[in-house]
Amino acid sequence: MSPLFARVTTGYRVGFWIDANVYLVQIMDDFIDFARARRAVSRAPAVSALLAELGQAQVMGDYLHMADLLQYEIWPIVAGEVVFSELSSVDAVRAHEKVARDTASMQTCARG
Amino acid sequence: MPDTALAELTRPILDQASQFEDTDPRLHLKRNRAILGARGPELWEMLKSCIHTGPQAKVTKIQLPHESLVYRGLHLASSYDRACEADTQVGFAKIPDTTEVVTVYGVGLGDIPRRLLKEPKVKWVRCVILNTDVFAQSCLYFDHSDWLSDPRTILILGKHETILHGPFVLHPVLYHLAENSAKRIADMAFTELQAPHVREYHVRRGGLYTKRIEASWPQFKEDRDVRELIKTNTEGRAFVCAAGPTLSEWFDWIKRERTPKDTVIAVSTALKPMLKAGITPNLVVIVDPNDDMIGHFEGVDLESLSSVGLCYTLMVRHDIPLMWRGPRYGFYINELTMVEKSKELNRGIVFCSGTVLHPCCDIATFMGHPSVYLFGADLSYVDGLTHVQGATYVEDAPCVLRPTIVNGYGERVNTEPNMIGYLRDLENYILANQEIKWIKAGKKGAEAVGTTWLEDLEWPSPVEDTGGAA
């Protein structure tokens, strides 16, 4: 995995979810750019479902599952281990925006 | 227990699990029960009661991609590669080669103890149960007999684990699911794991600290030493006012109860709300180096506070002490750059583990107060707010899932990881200073070991009528 993916998945896996959330937005941005660059819809439903599941896991605080999804589902796509033909899905973008929104909210940190 | 009784006991859960025909949970429970009954009768009794309440537990066993258990929406283990995940967790603990005893906080599906028992050097694996219900469900759905029957395994209930035993592995999900009685030890493990990140954060901010210290140094050298306050009030009470949301609920009480003998010590964030309520503190304490701390004093008539002392540390922006009209007391905290500075100029070092609340307590202690009252020390988002109303930066708390603390009513309240660390360090400080009477106000805020609730002293529960003759 790339250092960024490794940092985020490790963060979620060992409980440093705040650190992981900081970098998740970058991963999602990269992933959406990656998907858009391939411009078609054949894998869009699967990917948007994946993003929705990721967003849901984040809302639930199911960080271990987020690490799983990133490591075993999303990274193989980005790494080219899974054939990814094209993607252009409004749903995917919406799911991404939701993750970004939740993350921004989580970063709002109280002062001691 | 006869099998018919066991079947009756587990029927509600079996109904839930009936969709999984390839695994009979009774088989797992029987195997696990046989070992637990022999090795941990107390634990088994607790598990039995959890199994009775099974239908209320939100448990889903998932089969794909691999077997795992989802408890209240949280995966207890990877559903892709449990062994790899256990390796990650154990690897993260950085267990020294010479270690013979490893503690596992949170058992989950047993992957981590199982993995540790494969280490030839490990002679004992202490397994601390952080949530008995989770463990009960895990015992129902998964076979733990291999590691449970290993003589090197020691089972401990979280409520019995009072100090952190290292090296340890903390199950990250069980941390979130820790029951109230195990919350403190889970927090201690979590805070310890966060320590490298906190250190990294402070290293990143080292430039800011250096800049602040350089700017403050000329003034700091001229100001008084905080140690001048030692034993200056050995009779009155200290009212430490932090800026948590419950502070305002006690303004009337403070105004009514305060006597000239008492010392009111305010964190700088609480200053404005207190002044607005008509309470002028005796001391204001500030430690934060951030630029926006100046906001705590904007609009305040500082001339009217000319008898109020300011206790500040070297890394506070230098214009804050400069504009203060009352006496100023400088102090160090245990921060690397300041430790170096202390070799140049002898000043008091005050306990601070991340929050200004700590120096307030330490100052109250060395002033000699026999009792310290904590107000607004909520360390959590009481009523969904970050601070007391009227503070400079009061905000609505983030609404997404967060870590929690236990409040005075036994309820969970959202908080932040840093505030959990502050709370546990405060507790350790209090426990080390038990010659002082510590009284905490605001049961909606965090419960702190070693303190007594002011509410319970002020409004004790009525004694139950036993029906006896007068």
Image (cartoon, coloured by chain):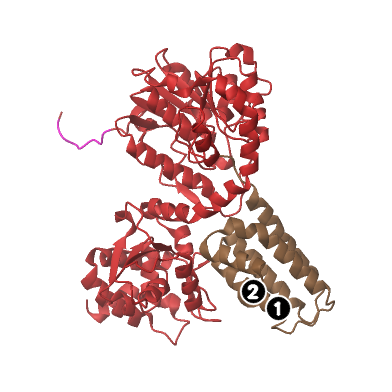
Chain colours: A brown, B red
Amino acid type, callout 2 = Met
Which label sits on residue B379? none
The prevailing secondary structure element of the residues shown in magenta is: loop
> Disc 2 marks which residue?
A1
Q: How far across and how far down the image is residue B55, in percent?
A: 41, 68
Asked whether residue B466 is drawn in magenta, I would say yes
Q: Is residue B373 visible?
A: yes
Asked whether residue A94 is drawn in magenta, I would say no
Instruction: Please tell me in which quadrant of the rendered image residue A1 appears.
Output: bottom right
Q: Chain of mark 1?
A: A
Circles 2, 1 touching at the beta carbon (< 8 Å): yes
Check disc 1: other Cα within 10 Å, few if <14, some if 14-19, many if 20+: few
Report the side of A59 relative to B67 (left or right).
right
> Disc 1 marks which residue?
A79
- Quarter holding the C terminus of chain B? top left
- Quarter holding the N terminus of chain B? bottom left
